[in-house]
Amino acid sequence: MSKIEQNLIMKLSPLYLQWREEALREGQQKGIKQGIKQVMKQAIQQGMQQGMQQGMQQGMRLMLESMLEVKFGAIDEALSQIVEPLSQLPAKESTQLILQLSREELLAQFSEEKGM
């Protein structure tokens, strides 16, 4: 190898290493940005899904409270205790229970289930 070639290599080597370092750093930054975007997207989707689920559960509880209030009048402590267990049932089943059972039967059914 000639002295000119050696000299050229010695001058280019630090430039190549600097370029390589910058390319790696840039690639890492792009990767981090993409990772953050992906995590944010997943978090937003999960948050929306949880929000929709909570909204549906709250809507179900409000509907059940409304049905209990229409059928039995004001909702007292005993009736308010069965709203949550009622909301865990399929909508059709909870509706049938409210429509078909008396206040006492409804309270008895859920106190029996609670005791088991």
Image (cartoon, grey):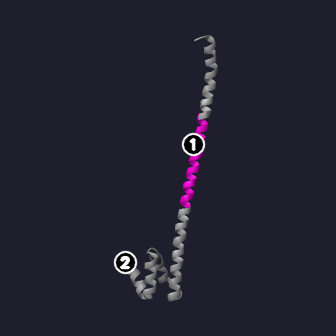
Q: Is disc 1 surrounded by few (<14), some (14 to 19) or many (20+) residues within 10 Å?
A: few
Magenta stretch: includes residue 44: yes
Asked which secondary structure carries label 2, the reply is: helix
Amino acid on which the number 1 mark rests in the picture: Gly
Q: Where is residue 24 shown, x and y percent of the image?
A: 58, 35
For marks 2 and 1, give the CA distance.
55 Å
Which residue is disc 1 drawn over?
31
Q: Quadrant of the N terminus?
A: top right
Q: Is disc 2 surrounded by few (<14), some (14 to 19) or many (20+) residues within 10 Å?
A: few
Start-end of magenta stretch: 24-47
Q: Residue at x 48, y 83 (%)?
A: 79
Q: Where is residue 45 shown, x and y percent of the image?
A: 55, 58
Q: Is residue 27 above or below residue 78?
A: above
- Magenta: main secondary structure: helix
Which residue is disc 2 drawn over?
115
The answer to whether one can see residue 38 in this image is yes
Q: Where is residue 41 shown, x and y percent of the image?
A: 57, 54
